[in-house]
Image: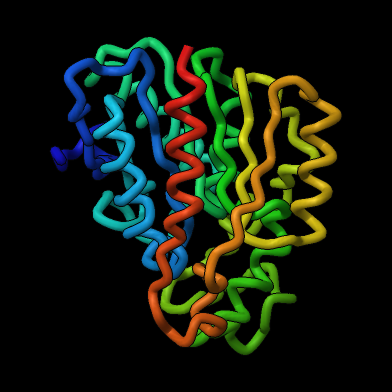
């Protein structure tokens, strides 16, 4: 693993490059797009395990922190969806330049999947888009964040569009909430990637709607895998506070990517 900073001097992003461990490197690189807030913390180990597994399979892989999150520059109160989409583009170009690959795949977890899906609209170099337990309707995601332990909606509650909410210790600014309002994976034109995988750990109405949307858009290049986890691996209040690693989901994603390389 090679940790480093990249991007502009004013908006430095922190990333970790996993070079291929196999004798022969794959022809495409993989970019992991993290979730937000407490879910970033809870899924970090799973993302790292997936990265190491894919590096052993011969991939150049980059995982990184968006501006205003993790070890990247910026304050949480200053983030916007537009900035995070720009960060994904910057990270994708950095991965290509660092590794010398010409094509990439994006793996997005939760809100990272929503962002990755939107980011593909402006790219022509994406092989696979993996939507891992995605946030389908970002506007509704605010209510999920506020339902997490230690969240504080403030005196005005979620109904006050000008309030900065406290989501388990992470700020959700008015600007970020405004960006959420227009993000719905089940309405996005996800036609740019060569293939799309939706991998989910449980059944949800919005996952069903997203599946139908993708089947209609790309019937020959879409796959859905339901891979039940032994516990709701993201939701702390339903897993007794334990960190649950979804090993079968990680293996399913790695198998999909390694089996699809052209």
> Residue 211's x, y, as percent?
78, 42
Residue toward you, 151 or 35:
35
- Residue 67 lies left or right of residue 35; in this view the side is left
Please indicate, yes or no, whether residue 106 appears anywhere in the rendered image: yes
Q: Residue at x 44, y 65 (%)?
A: 37
- Residue 251 lies left or right of residue 70; in this view the side is right
> Residue 146's x, y, as percent?
61, 78
Identify the colour scheme used. rainbow
- Residue 139 lies left or right of residue 230; in this view the side is right
Q: Residue at x 66, y 64 (%)?
A: 141
Name above or below for residue 63 compared with residue 70.
Answer: above
The quadrant where residue 69 appears: bottom left
- Residue 142 lies left or right of residue 99; in this view the side is right
Q: Residue at x 24, y 19 (%)?
A: 99
> Residue 157's x, y, as percent?
67, 82
Q: Residue at x 40, y 40 (%)?
A: 32
Q: Tell me the quarter of the image containing the N terminus.
A: top left
Residue toward you, 142 or 31:
31
> Residue 172's x, y, as percent?
53, 66
Name above or below for residue 123 compared with residue 216.
Answer: above
Please indicate, yes or no, whether residue 164 appears anywhere in the rendered image: no
Total labels drawn: 0
Name above or below for residue 261 compared with residue 154.
Answer: above
Residue toward you, 212 or 6:
212
């Amino acid at each position: 693993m090679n940790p480093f900073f990249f991007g502009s001097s004013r908006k430095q992003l922190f990333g970790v490059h996993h070079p291929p461990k196999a004798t022969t490197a794959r022809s495409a690189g993989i970019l992991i797009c993290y979730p937000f807030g407490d879910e970033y913390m809870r899924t970090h180990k799973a993302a790292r395990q997936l990265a190491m597994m894919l590096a052993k399979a011969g991939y150049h892989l980059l995982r990184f922190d968006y501006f205003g999150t993790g070890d990247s520059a910026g304050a949480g109160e200053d983030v916007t969806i537009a900035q995070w989409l720009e960060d994904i583009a910057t990270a994708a170009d950095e991965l290509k330049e660092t590794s010398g690959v010409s094509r990439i795949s994006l793996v997005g977890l939760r809100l990272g999947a929503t962002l990755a899906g939107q980011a593909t609209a402006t790219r022509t170099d994406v092989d696979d888009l993996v939507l891992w337990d995605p946030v389908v309707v970002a506007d509704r995601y605010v209510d999920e964040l506020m339902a997490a332990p230690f969240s504080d909606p403030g005196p005005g509650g979620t109904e006050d569009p000008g309030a900065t909410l406290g989501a388990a210790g992470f700020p959700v600014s008015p600007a970020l909430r405004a960006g959420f309002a227009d993000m719905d994976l089940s309405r996005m034109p996800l036609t740019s990637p060569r293939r799309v995988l939706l991998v989910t750990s449980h059944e949800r109405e919005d996952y069903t709607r997203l599946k139908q949307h993708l089947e209609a858009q790309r019937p020959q290049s879409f796959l859905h895998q339901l891979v039940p986890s032994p516990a709701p691996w993201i939701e702390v209040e339903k897993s007794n506070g334990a960190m649950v690693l979804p090993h079968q989901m990680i293996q399913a994603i790695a198998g999909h990517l390694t089996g699809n390389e052209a």
